[in-house]
Amino acid sequence: MASEADMNLITPPRLIPALSAGFNTVAGKVYLIILPVLLDVFLWLGPQFRIDRLFTPLLTEYANTISRFASAEIAQQVNDLTALWIESLKTYNLASALQTFPIGLPSLMANRMSDLTPFGQPAVLEINSFSSAFGWWVLFLVIGFLMGCLFLNTLARSSGETPIKFEFKAFLVQSGLCAVFILTILFAVFLISLPASAIVSLLAMINASLGSIALLAVLFLLIWLFIPLIFTPHSIFLGQRNLLVSALTSVRLVRNHLTGSSLFLVAAILIAQGMDILWKIPPTSSWLTLVGILGHAFIYTSLLTASFIYFRSGLRWLMELIKQQSARMVQA
């Protein structure tokens, strides 16, 4: 049985060492950024899949129909919103669906319109039917999801003290578990959103301030429910083949070390979003955009690698914590 002094030596995962180890790992294994770079280069220099000509008539007809039956004020709001949607569609590339969330590749160009490249105007593929648009969208989603799973699988195998060989069967199992995890989260959000939206709308009709407060309460509820699950994919890609156990492990780690986990998440978001401001400065017509793509891929890959290192450290700490608690129960 471990002595009390030995048990007190365990320390929770720490922010700075995890971030430092993540950046050092990627600096020593630069090939880890290849997939995010390839995705961004494709979205930057590749063909643009446009759907604005397909959806613009539909949106215009919808706005005209609403305007016939609604008051002048509501009709104006609908027309303004429709104009905003139409303008957004003109700069939307359907291939940006290759960036999936929360399991996917980080991308700088997914939300940027590459209307002019160093080679001139990019090739444009107009999609003229809803079935084709849906087919391309599903294809991009599946490819993006699988690439994201491969990316996270590679980071998980490379972030340990000893590299682990790639196993195709394990990769398929991990991809399946992640797909079930995402679908479960989406279903849970849908179930919560239905009554929540009705309550928020009702309160907003009574008083706008009440509606705003209710909306904030719903957002805090969603954060409280789903943030503890943030390390579930980490557990899956580190070899856990039970989705429920992976989710419970993530929840237990976050709940037992809420402050440290929150600080790590906030620090990662601030670093990533802060650097994105720099990477987005060059116009898409400049070759400096390639520097932004490389920098973005390096930062995000390093942060994700750091999250795996943080989770590994947290898992060891959690196991020791459980042993501590068990030892104390036996002594009692």
Image: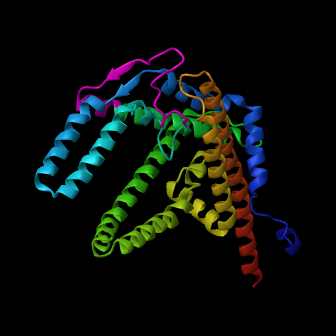
Q: Is residue 5 left or right of residue 214?
A: right
Q: In which quarter of the image is residue 113?
A: top left
Q: Quadrant of residue 322?
A: bottom right
Residue 119: where, in percent of width, then height? 51, 14
Main structural element of the magenta stretch: helix, strand or loop? loop
Residue at 61 percent of width and 46 percent of height: 273
Classify 218 as above or below 237.
below
In depth, the one of 323 and 79 nearer the eye is 79
Classify 319 as above or below 32.
below
Residue 202: where, in percent of width, then height? 28, 72
Residue 64: where, in percent of width, then height? 15, 45
Residue 123: where, in percent of width, then height? 41, 17
Give the magenta-colored segment's residue range: 107-136
In depth, the one of 185 and 131 nearer the eye is 131
Classify 309 as above or below 164.
below
In depth, the one of 312 and 269 nearer the eye is 269
* Residue at the extreme top of the image, as rendered: 119
Q: In this view, does 230 lie to the left or right of 80?
A: right
